[in-house]
Image: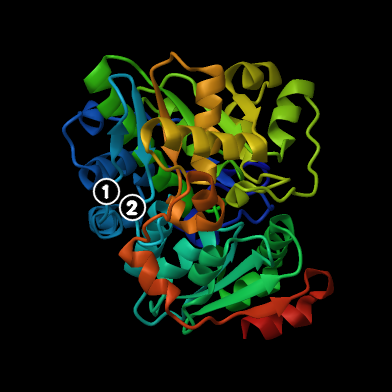
Amino acid sequence: MKYISTHRNAPPVGVSEAIKAGLAPDGGLYIPAKHIAFHDRALAPSLEFPVRAIELLMPLFEGDRAVSLLSAICREAFSFPVPLRWRDKEQAVLELFHGPTLAFKDVGARFLASFLDHTAPADAPPVTILVATSGDTGGAVAAAFAGKLSARVFVFFPQGRVSERQRAQLTCWGGNVTSFSVRGSFDDCQSLVKEALATPFLADRFRLTSANSINLGRLLPQVTYYAHAAAGFLARTGEKPLIIVPTGNVGNVTAAFWARAWGAPIGEIVLAVNANRAIPDFLATGEYRPRPSVPTLANAMDVGNPSNLERLRCLFPDFDALRQAVRAYSVSDDEIRNTIRDVFSESGEVLCPHTAVAEHVRCRYYPDRPAIIVATAHPAKFETIVEPLIGRPVPVPPALAELLTRPRFEQELDPAGIRLSDWEHLLS
């Protein structure tokens, strides 16, 4: 299997090269050069998740030297459950917050860390991982790579725009993890990372790669939990589920579209976004207008210029086909608050703000459809938002409680003043 750039101006590469590069040399994102078809055995309803992941990813690694390592990588990375929790006979929640940092980003981050660890030559210097985060990605990547000799990690997060518990997860590591509090938005952080990756001198000297969802090593493993959930849903209900995905940088939902294109039994896929409306407005008008991100309660989705929209547009290059295939709805902060409060009052279920965005879209637009909503983070990470709405504390899982006791290591950074010489100093 070969991978090509969304900009179509870079040579095709194998999956290992695409993952280690992070970004294509022409500035585009890597995508598969052709569609694959999942084997029937990969969609058998009885498979455990790590086994299914191996079967699903095998054709995507075909012909690559890493294919022989795929089983070990998946078994090491996917050591926690991704359960489909049933509300009733046709409504389910895909819980993706049972990993080490209580967010769906753990799936891709741990796969990427395991992949780089297993494929690193014994005498090679460490790669340098750059990651921009709007909240959860950086913590997941830091946790996945902390203490590994194969990589150094540099995390960039927007100052004052992450929750305190997210900030603790971003800054409690030290060692091979360096965290920068950036005076700006997530888009400023993302621009910094893209600029460095696109600078050949820096990329070559420091062996740069990315751990954002622009990296295939983050995105491909996310395909697996959609296929896993859909196979279980079909086996129980006989229906292909509608899947509603809380969406910011569009990586997670792109994985859902790829899973469906390659044979997973998925019905409609819906994007649930917060007040950052770039995608709904694009679908409504046909004009894509990036804009500064707007801070919201669902802060991990505060993205004004979503990178992975490039991949989605490559999947549906005709705009009319894109508009027919993709639905996106925007949810306000007041609607997030009301959804958290109402769901808890009716059922005792506690939602994080991001999951509440998906739940609001389901209740308002698809109340009677067999559906899966995607729960992307644990509500304990957002206690200052959730607890006043439900009137009681949210229990803190042990994994998070331990991280909250650690000292913090962070440096402030002004993105406006970063030049080439500054990058050399930062990464040295």
What amino acid is labelled 2 in the image? His
> Above or below — where is 296 with respect to 39?
below
> Above or below — where is 255 with respect to 132?
above
Q: Nearer the viewer, residue 259 or 345?
A: 345
Whole-percent x and y of residue 78?
Answer: 28, 53
Whole-percent x and y of residue 3?
Answer: 51, 44
Give the residue number, with chain letter if any, for mark 1.
Answer: 81
Residue name at image x 30 percent, y 52 percent: 67
Q: CA distance from mark 2 to mark 1?
A: 6 Å
What amino acid is labelled 1 in the image? Pro
Whole-percent x and y of residue 428?
Answer: 62, 86
Which disc number belongs to residue 73?
Answer: none
Tell me: 159 left or right of 287.
left
Q: Count of labels shown?
A: 2
Res 13 seen here: no
For this orientation, the residue located farthest to the left is: 46
Tell me: 369 left or right of 25.
left
Residue name at image x 49 percent, y 40 percent: 355
Sequence order check, earlier mark of 2 and 1: 1
Q: Quadrant of the N terminus?
A: top left
Which element is circle 2 on? loop
Tell me which colouring the rendered structure shows.
rainbow
Q: Residues within 10 Å of mark 2 (few under 14, many from 20)?
A: many
For this orientation, the residue located farthest to the right is: 416
Q: Nearer the viewer, residue 60 or 90?
A: 90
Which disc number belongs to residue 98?
Answer: 2
Tell me: 229 left or right of 185.
left
Residue name at image x 23 percent, y 21 percent: 236
Are discs 2 and 1 less than 8 Å apart at CB?
yes
Residue name at image x 50 percent, y 32 percent: 342
> Above or below — where is 419 with respect to 362?
below
Q: Nearer the viewer, residue 365 or 303?
A: 365
